[in-house]
Amino acid sequence: MTLRADIETLWERSQEGLDAETATAADLATLETFLDALEAGEVRAAEKTGDDVTSWETNEWVKRGVLLAFGLHETRRREHGGVDYYDVLPLRETADLANRGTRNTPDGTVLRRGAYLGSDCIAMSPSFVNVGAYVDDGTLVDSCDTVGSCAQIGADVKLGANTLIGGVLEPVEDAPVVIEADVSLGAGCRVTSGFRVGEGCVVGENTLLTPNVPVYDLVDEEIRYGHLPAQRRAFARYVPSSLGDHELFGDAGAFKPAVVATALSADTRDATQREEVLRE
């Protein structure tokens, strides 16, 4: 049987009552193989099937495998760096990162089991990369960043400090967040609920990207939801809300968050280029 078939069989059994108390050693070995494959980048929670950022499709069996990794393991005492903690999954072993030229700084960089980091990456402390996340080559995960479960982060991406990339586990989302290659997210950005950012975008600091916040694309003169097209400069703004008609707001009106997307200039792109000396 293939790994996918093994995971799908485990999922069916879990729907019939299989849990951490009844899981066998063979069941747990299947999950270990699955987590190893995630860490090696051999399987991914989503894959791009076309040219456009909207063409990403979820590998449902991979997401189910991640859920099984929690459901079929018991919370127990673990130890890392002389500190006791209690969790379902251990932290990720990092010996393989050195062979790829990838760095993670101490005292607060948490890489959970089942997370993939490519070559030439930097993970600054404190930061957290959750199970099933895929971080491609040359990407910077800066201080106070969170990369949520199953998030797909492309190559040469810059996640500014205090950036939140949402996960799929709680609440369970249909699709993971996707950040394509060469994207720069400013400090304090939040990307959640399966939102997709196209290749080469530059997003201003403190911008919220989520499917229920409209993207006013001034390049194509369209209002979009759930994705930002490639090669855009995007930033947060507020637009009038229909709630402004309520008498409680008076003459001040009410506003809701929105994102404005404009053409990406060469000056903006140059200002966000990665610093190669950090990786020599």
Image (cartoon, grey):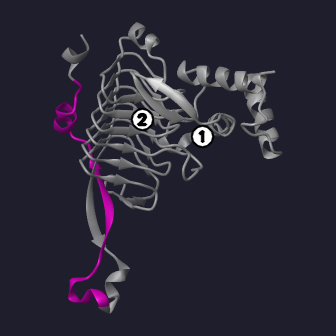
Disc 2 residue type (three-letter):
Glu
Mark 1, other Cα within 10 Å: few <14 / some 14–19 / many ≥20: some
Q: Nearer the viewer, residue 214 or 172?
A: 172
**Marker disc for residue 180:** 2
Within the image, what quadrant is residue 125 found in?
A: top left
- Vertically, is 63 above or below 83? below
Which stretch appears magenta? 248-274
- Residue 55 screen position, x and y as percent: 55, 41
Is any part of residue 46 visible from this angle?
no
Horizontally, residue 125 falls left or right of residue 66, namely: left
- Residue 127 screen position, x and y as percent: 34, 34
Residue holding disc 1: 57
Q: Secondary structure at mark 1?
A: strand
Which residue is pictured at 39% across the width and 26% down the height? 155
Q: Secondary structure at mark 2?
A: loop
Mark 2, other Cα within 10 Å: few <14 / some 14–19 / many ≥20: many
- Vertically, is 143 above or below 170? above
Q: Nearer the viewer, residue 66 or 5?
A: 66
Which residue is pictured at 22% across the width and 28% down the height? 273
- Vertically, is 182 above or below 263? above
- Vertically, is 138 above or below 218? above
- Residue 276 screen position, x and y as percent: 22, 17
Q: Exactly how many numbered labels are in the figure? A: 2
